[in-house]
Amino acid sequence: MSADALELVFTGSAVLGTALLLLSSIGGGMHVRLHLHLRVPHLRVPFVRATRTDDATATPALLAFLAMFGIGGLFGATAFSLGPAGQMAVALAFGAFGAGVGFAIFAALRRAEGDEPTALRDLVGRKARVTVSIGERGHGTIALTYDGAVQTLAATATTPIARGREVEILGVHGMAVTVRSLPPP
């Protein structure tokens, strides 16, 4: 391969990899899936936990490899004045380093993410306490703890329920819940 063609490959790799890595970092709501059915041997590293479907670490690692491969090839050509084989060796070393750093950073970010928030429909069957009495027309407010915080929800019931009473959530209607009074303990 000629020096000009190799430089074009390295430049294209650096620009494309960097641009796609930046887009994947800032584009949290954009999803483009590319399914490649490859058999990859399972590599066990004791301090890194990743799954085969962990797109949040695999894609950035691949893009980091691509970007650093191009940068390493250009660096090998200009800084060391290496031939094609030397440029390729430096490009592969830079690419492996970039993939490792990208994998480590995005794996740490993935572990730092919180759990999915509780959906209101998952509250059915939980117990809560009435904070604003549910009157004759059946409207009031309840409080319960979920997702690590005390949440207050509008509540309806078929019978009046006094403030401070314990209730059970029977159903969800929009942002309000239907409750029934529990017998005193």
Image (tube, rainbow, N blue to C red):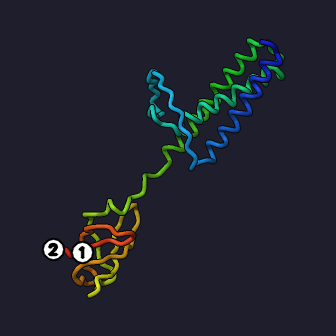
Give x and y (percent) for residue 150. 39, 69
* Front one among 79 and 66: 66
Q: Residues within 10 Å of mark 1 (few under 14, many from 20)?
A: many
Circle 2 — which element? loop
Of the image marks 2 and 1, the number of the one nearer the N terminus: 1
Circle 1 — which element? strand
* Residue on which disc 1 sits: 166
Q: Is residue 34 above or below residue 118?
A: above
Q: Is residue 44 above or below residue 107?
A: above
- Going 63% across and 25% down the picture, which residue do you hit? 96
- Quarter holding residue 20: top right
Q: Give the position of the N terminus as an image quadrant.
A: top right
Q: Residues within 10 Å of mark 2 (few under 14, many from 20)?
A: few
- Quarter holding residue 135: bottom left
* Front one among 65 and 15: 15
In the picture, measured across the screen, residue 149 lies left or right of residue 157, that is right
* Residue on which disc 2 sits: 185
In the picture, measured across the screen, residue 166 lies left or right of residue 45, that is left
Q: Is residue 3 above or below residue 25?
A: above
- Quarter holding residue 98: top right
Report the amino acid beneath label 2.
Pro
Give x and y (percent) for residue 32. 56, 40
- Going 58% across and 47% down the picture, which residue do you hit? 30
Report the amino acid beneath label 1.
Glu
In the picture, measured across the screen, residue 115 lies left or right of residue 63, that is left
Alpha-carbon span between mark 2 and mark 1: 9 Å
Depth-wise, is mark 2 or mark 1 nearer the camera? 1
**Do labels 2 and 1 touch, CB within 8 Å?**
yes
